[in-house]
Amino acid sequence: MTGLLDLDPAVVARARALARSAAQPVVELAQAHTTVSLERAVLRLAGCEGADAGHPAGDVPWVNRLVDVVADQVGLGHGVALPLGDAIARGEAPDLPTLAALALEGRLKLRLPDEAAAEAEARHVMEELVGAGIARIDAQRHERDRRRTELGDPPAPWIYLIVATGDIREDVVQAQAAAREGADVVAVIRSTGQSLLDHVPEGETYDGYAGTYATQANFRLMRRALDDVGAELGRYVRLTNYASGLCMPEIAVLAGLERLDMMLNDCMYGIVFRDINPIRTFVDQRFSRQIHARAGIVINTGEDNYLTTADAVDAAHTVLVSQLLNERFAHEAGLEDWQLGLGHAFEISPSVPDSFRLELAHALLVREVFPDAPLKYMPPTKHMTGNVFGGYLHDGFFNLAALLTGQSIILVGMMTEGIVTPFLSDRDLALENVRYVRATAGRLGEDLRPAPDGFIATRARAVLDESVQLLERIERDGLLRAIGEGTFGVTRRPADGGRGLDGVVAKDERYWNPASDHLEGI
Amino acid sequence: MGNPITAYGDTTGDGMVQVSFTLPLAAGARADGAAQLFANRMGIEPAMVVHSKAMGPGHSFFVVYGRARVWVDPDEVEVAEREYPLLSAKEVDARVREGLGRPLVVLGACIGTDAHTVGIDAILSVKGFAGEKGLESHREMRVVNLGAQVAIDDLVRAAHDEHADAVLVSQVVTQRDAHLTNTTALAKAFDAAFVDGRRPLLVVGGPRFEPAQAALLGVDRVFGRGTTPGDVASYLVHALLPVAPAVPAQPTPAAARR
């Protein structure tokens, strides 16, 4: 599927080099800071589960308690691992949750070990705990490989369906039904607003808004349900959830521990669409992606969102620019090409002349710039008008574009998009649409060659050129400034604004975190 | 009574309609019969079940054509007519210039946990919606778009600091009627914060709002699906700048407007 557009490899290489150099200052910024969520993720890797259930405002996870007490008593600049490892080494408590309970009673006195021997002991304690967590993630990765080998993978594109009841028990029923109807990937949408919570809720949950809370217990329950239905169907059914938000690192750890297969993880989504502080986001996304890399999880990026706020023709190049940045940040964090589910969408207004040819140009461009990435293609949402019959046709053209251009993961479009939550029959009709296109024209791409200087090839090259120009500007002015000026998704997000900035801490010289040592191979 | 009408298939008065639905029954003759009976009870007689298909083991989907045995008199229909004239962008600016003598300050936001800025951006951003440019494009308007997930208290503060003439709030998320509870909370907060009657005009909009809900929700105007920037601009001028007599430089007290 490469070479149809006659793209100049030197231009593509130039775009990549610009993305790399634009990302570098942000990577260095991320390396120089830690965040409360990153530190909590280290503690989750160290096996710290559970919550203080006695708080009047609701459960407070023990990891939040511990990070708060470290921040209060000795500061976070050196990380939580040293002072907490030291407390366990001194025999204050046998494990982290007990330490947290002590802290709650005001009976925990933390210090930074000053002698070499004490520090070595503190490090030893935390290395053991975190090492066990990493080993659990490794074991889950092997388990996934074992099941995939045993059951086999479905042919591309994989069919991605969503469940979003708010109640994990109902989600399980719906997810199994979706798998039986043909879903290769099931995504559990999170409760509205979870990305803005600065903690991960605990336990099984039954009361989400427009989605279900991402919790470790919910992950585990859904994993088991999909393993069961996968065994019944004879294929491995993948589970997806969402990392983006204020708790990216923690949710990434939980996804690794509970063997999720894909995670929505975009380097800028939280900034642009959730008004999360840019620095917080870049620090958190880097660590979360290191965890995903280790866990063998495929990330899904969120470029489709840009096209729901900006015009899909005018902003086509911002999608490619964001994909190149997402790729760079992902590679830097250790993810490989097969783990990059770069996102894009079929969102051009059908009233634009030749809109389908434009869609083909954009989809082919992305396919050819990222030949080894499992691209995730999103269906139309913006131009679904309420005319369900027209919407069904529109979704059919989306499916055709996906198959013609070799997309890897397709989210199945519903004709009732934007009207009601899909009826049982809507999902069935949507899958029938995919099957129809696949059966009648699934291999049509083999026969089609865009004319060398025709509409599609010319448009694709123009978008690539615009992307290079935008990357030149970003590289010159700085990525943070570009975000501040509303380059992506038209929303302006200054580096000193947004949520979660108070949870960002500069690392001091003694900063230490055993998870990063493992993940970066130190 | 005027002239009662019924649905039109291909002949006036034939009453022909098409419906589709799912019943919680396994596919089969009994399910088809139930679908026909169900359509009959909806007023479709005779009903033809032209398509039936199993939706998993316990449900069946149907497409039914048939004759609806109901008639309506168009004179019975109550239409919420637009209470203001639709103005061009030029006319809006001229009215603001003459009536206010300074730019009209419009503050926009999505409140609560709603991250869907599509609606507010369609009305405010230059890009606009349905071929109409948004309020930002008006020479005589100063638009402050606070974006997504703005806390109500922050919105009140911003309205105060910016001396907003009008506050526009869009809401897309409607689970458990969140859009209605959020709007009521919004109106209460503004009523409490602007006790001297200088509350800015409160306008909410979103695909699931009904324009008739305004009084119930405590806001000045509600816009539903398909609203364009021109609708909103024309309304703002109508509500804030009545044609006759001369208007004060500051926003009209909310109480006087209602």
Image: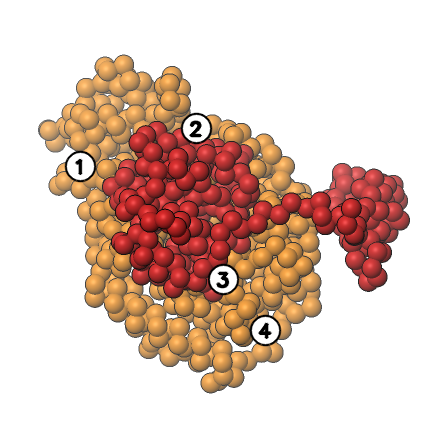
The chain drawn in orange is: A
Q: Earlier in the sequence, mark 4 or mark 1?
A: 1
- Which residue sits at x=84%, y=51%? B67
Residue that label 4 marks: A445
* Whether labels 2 and 3 share one chain: no
Would you say B223 lies left or right of A521 here? right
Depth order, front residue of B176/A507: B176
Q: CA distance from mark 2 to mark 4?
A: 47 Å
Tag 2 near tag 4, CB within 8 Å: no
User: Which tag, 1 or 2, sits closer to the chain's start?
Assistant: 1
Label 1 in the same subunit as label 2: yes
- Residue B42 visible in the snapshot: yes
Q: Which mark is residue B130?
A: 3
What residue is shown at x 53% (from left), y 29% (from top)?
A: A206
Q: Which chain is red?
A: B
- Amino acid type at image mark 4: Gly
Chain ID at mark 1: A
Question: Dot 1 corresponds to which residue?
Answer: A77
Inter-mark Cα distance, 3 to 1? 51 Å
Q: CA distance from mark 2 to mark 3?
A: 44 Å
